[in-house]
Image (tube, rainbow, N blue to C red):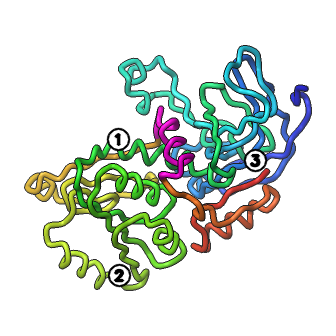
């Protein structure tokens, strides 16, 4: 029975930081489309209006749900299937798409960032954007989108076997990337991050080989010891300076700037690469996480109802959570 025609509860942003819970029309299911009902991960960057977000907006780009309605010509999906959604949308007709560089799409869109996403009771996706999940819980499945981005980061890094890596930060994507590096030939991974719940979970997951818990107020002595203990640096540094390859992997404000001496980059032959979002990485993400090869149990630290969204934001800001998911 079609759910279209009625209303549903959704999180509605009029502008950055300006949100409300409101009733909106349930989306219609068109040909080749599937409606799911499920949960979604939170994103502080969208709340602040960062990244490529457009408003007004129903956010939510890390959606997992159960199929509740199927459109005409849909094949391979049944009512009750649990699916994760790839939020990215490329046009397939611009200069970059036509030469196989779809992530540089000139018309790139993302559900929950530039178009309505998963912070609603029902969401409709094109069938080719959904992937079945069998073993992961709904909460853990919200980490599949960060995992897909981590896989793209690994593709960009293209690490040779045996490299030593310094990884700064212990957020969800970083902890998944650390595990992927271990599974794909890194001989040593050092994770450096501030003390707290994120580093506690990093150790529980055995994400790295060594851990440096930084003092937020006075980290200088620890940085000096890191340099003294590693006089030749690392083969790859993720979001840090120094080493053979520097990969910028996190999401930053547009106004954020970095300053490096060109002579250092030139003289040490440092390679600087960026890693933005992903395309076509979801099948590998599902394979790694659904099989248990990449461990995410415990990374979702909190679950909130949609009506309690402000409490979820407060928890995120408190630095007392690693990953939060919302159940509409």
Whether tag 1 and tag 3 are in contact, CB under 8 A, the answer is no
**Please, what secondary structure does the residue beneath circle 3 have?**
strand
Residue beneath label 3, please? 12
Residue beneath label 1, please? 155
Q: Is residue 319 magenta?
A: no
Q: Residue at x 14, y 72 (%)?
A: 231
**Along the viewing direction, whichever of 193 and 12 lies nearer the viewer:** 193
Residue beneath label 2, please? 219
**Along the viewing direction, whichever of 298 and 265 lies nearer the viewer:** 298
Q: Residue at x 64, y 53 (%)?
A: 41
Closest to the camera, between mark 1 and mark 3, is 1
Mark number displayed over residue 133: none
Q: Residue 175: x, y in percent?
A: 45, 60
Q: Which residues are magenta?
A: 278-293
Q: Earlier in the sequence, mark 1 or mark 3?
A: 3
Cα distance in 3D space between marks 3 and 2 = 40 Å
């Amino acid at each position: 029975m079609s759910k279209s025609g009625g209303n549903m509860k959704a999180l509605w942003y009029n502008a950055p930081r300006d949100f409300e819970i409101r009733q909106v029309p349930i989306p219609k299911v068109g040909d080749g489309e599937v409606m799911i009902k499920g949960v979604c991960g939170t994103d502080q960057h969208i709340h602040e209006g960062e990244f490529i977000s457009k408003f007004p907006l129903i956010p939510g780009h890390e959606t997992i749900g159960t199929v509740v309605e199927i459109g005409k010509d849909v094949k391979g999906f049944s009512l009750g299937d649990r699916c994760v959604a790839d939020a990215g949308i490329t046009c397939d007709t611009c200069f970059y798409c036509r030469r196989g560089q779809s992530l540089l799409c000139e018309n790139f869109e993302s559900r929950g960032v530039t178009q309505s996403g998963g912070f609603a009771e029902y969401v409709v996706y094109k069938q080719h954007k959904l992937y079945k999940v069998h073993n992961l819980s709904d909460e853990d499945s919200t980490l599949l989108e960060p995992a897909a981005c981590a896989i793209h980061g690994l593709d960009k890094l293209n690490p040779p076997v045996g490299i030593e890596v310094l990884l700064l930060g212990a957020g969800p994507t970083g902890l998944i990337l650390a595990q992927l590096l271990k599974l794909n030939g890194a001989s040593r991974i050092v994770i450096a991050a501030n003390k707290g719940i994120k580093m506690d979970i990093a150790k529980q997951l055995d994400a790295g080989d060594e851990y440096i818990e930084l003092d937020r107020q006075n980290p200088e002595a620890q940085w000096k010891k890191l340099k003294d203990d590693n006089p030749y640096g690392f083969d790859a540094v993720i979001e840090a300076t120094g080493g053979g390859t520097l990969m910028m992997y996190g999401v930053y404000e547009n106004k954020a700037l970095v300053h490096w001496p060109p002579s250092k980059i030139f003289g040490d032959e440092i390679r600087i690469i960026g890693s933005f979002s992903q395309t076509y990485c979801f099948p590998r993400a599902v394979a790694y996480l659904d099989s248990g090869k990449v461990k995410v149990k415990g990374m979702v630290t909190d679950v909130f109802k949609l009506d309690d969204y402000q409490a979820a934001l407060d928890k995120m800001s408190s630095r007392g959570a690693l990953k939060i998911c919302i159940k509409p």
